[in-house]
Image (spheres, rainbow, N blue to C red):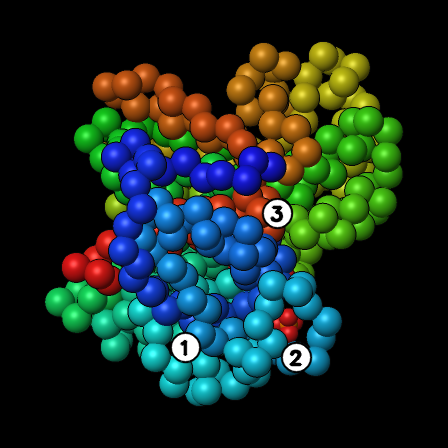
Amino acid sequence: MSSTFAFAPSDAGHTRPTDTIRIALAGCGTVGGALLDLLARHGAPIERRTGLRFEVVSILVRDRELPRSLHVPRERLTDSVQEFLAVPADIVVEAIGGVTTAATIARATLARGQRLVTANKALLRAEGPALAALAHGRAPLGAAIDFEAAVGGGVPIVRALRESLTGHGVSRIRSVLNGTTNYILSRVEDGDDEATALRAAQRAGFAEADPSRDLTGLDAADKIAVLAWLAFGVDPTRLPVRTLGLPPDLATAVRNAKAKGRVLRLVAEVEERDGVVRASVAPVLLDANDPLARARDEENVVVIESESAGAITLHGRGAGGLATASALLADLLRASAPVLA
Ligand code: NAP
Ligand code: HSE
C-alpha cells in the first residue's frame, strides 16, 4: 500500500498548526486494530496536511491480556465500559460488534453531545433511527453519527446515499454486500471446499464473530436494510427482508451455475415501487456480464439505479480490517472539522 494519503487539493503541500482530536476506541479486533495500525502509519502525513493529530485516549476490549499489535498502547486498554466512557474524548469509535454493549456506548456518546463513528450494521439495523434522532436532538451540543464502515467496507456507499445521491430519485439498489460469502463463492469456483474457504475468510478477518450471520444472509440483510433507510427513508427496524443464505450443497450449485455459463452470487436488493419498499437477500444466478458477477473474493459491488443519473456502480473491498478502517478514518477526518469549529 502507498505510504501517503490523498487529501483535498487545497491541503497539498501545506503544513498546518496541529489540533489534537481525542479518540475513544471501543473494540481492538480486526477493524479497531487496523484503525490503530492505519493511524500509526499515516498519522504523521495526516497531521502535516490537515493539522489534525488523532490521539487514542482509551480502548475498550473484552480481554486486556490478549496479545495485540505493537501499535496498541496497552496502558490505554480497559475492559470496563464505565471506565471507557469516563475518559474525556472528542469522538467515540465503536467497533465491537453486537447490539447490547454497542448500543449502551452509542446512546451514552450521543446523549452527552459527542460524535459517534460506528462500523456496526447490526446496531444500525436495530437502533439506527433512534440513534439518529438522539444525535439530531443533541446536535447543538456537538452530537453526530457517522457509519461509512458499516456497509460496503471500503466502498463509499453510505456517504453516496446520504449526500451525493439524495436528489437523484433512487429507485432500486442491487448489490453484493457480504465479503465472506463472496470470498467462499470465489474459492469454491476455483475448486476449494466450502469449509476450507470459510476458515480462510475467518483468518483474513472478513467473517463476523458469529460467521452464521454471514452464511445465512443476516449480515447482508442488516446492510440492505440500512441502505433502504438511507435511500428511501424507511425504518430499518421494521423493514422485512426476505433472507436466504448460501445454498446447502454449494459445490454442486456453483458447478451447475458454471455449466450454464452463469455466476452464483448472494444478491441483496431493495426497490421502491408504487410507494412500497421491498428488500431481499438471496443466492441468484447472474449473467457473466452483470456487474454483480464481477465481485471477486471479499469484494462488494453496489449498483444504484436512479431516475436522473441512470445506473451508478461502486465496486471495491467490502470486508477486512484495512478496507474497513479506511472508511472509519474517512469518517474521523470528516467528523473532526466540527470538533474544531
Ligand atoms: P472482532 O475482530 O471480533 O473484534 C471485536 C473487538 O471488540 C475485540 O477487540 C473485542 O475484545 C471487543 N469486544 C467485543 N465485545 C465486547 C464487549 N462486550 N465489551 C468489550 N469489548 C468487546 O470484530 P471486527 O471484525 O473487528 O468487527 C467489529 C465491528 O465492525 C462489527 O460490528 C462488524 O460487523 C463490523 N465490521 C467488520 C468488518 C470486517 O471486515 N471485519 C467490516 C465492516 C464492519 P477482545 O479483543 O478482547 O476480544
Ligand atoms: N462479515 C462482513 C462481510 C464484514 O463478510 O461482509 C464486512 O461488513
C-alpha gap between disc 3 and disc 2: 22 Å
Q: Compare marks 3 and 1 and give the one earlier in the sequence.
A: 1
**Residue 194: percent from left, percent from top:** 82, 41
Q: Quadrant of residue 125?
A: bottom left
Question: For numbered disc 1, what is the local secondary structure?
Answer: helix
Q: Amino acid at mark 2?
A: Asp
Name the residue that disc number 3 marks: 320
Give the foreground label among 2 and 1.
2
Residue in view at x 44 percent, y 87 percent:
82
C-alpha gap between disc 2 and disc 1: 19 Å
Residue 196 — which label?
none
Q: Amino acid at mark 1?
A: Thr
Q: Is mark 2 within 8 Å of ligand 1?
A: yes
Question: For numbered disc 2, what is the local secondary structure?
Answer: loop
Q: Residue furthest left?
A: 140
Q: Is mark 3 within 8 Å of ligand 1?
A: yes
Q: Amino acid at mark 3?
A: Gly
Residue 236 visible? The answer is no
Q: Are marks 3 and 1 in contact (CB under 8 Å)?
A: no
Name the residue that disc number 1 marks: 104
**Residue 98: percent from left, percent from top:** 53, 67
Left or right placement of residue 188 versus residue 64 in this view: right
Q: Compare marks 2 and 1 and give the one earlier in the sequence.
A: 2
Residue in view at x 66 percent, y 65 percent:
70
Residue 63 — which label?
2
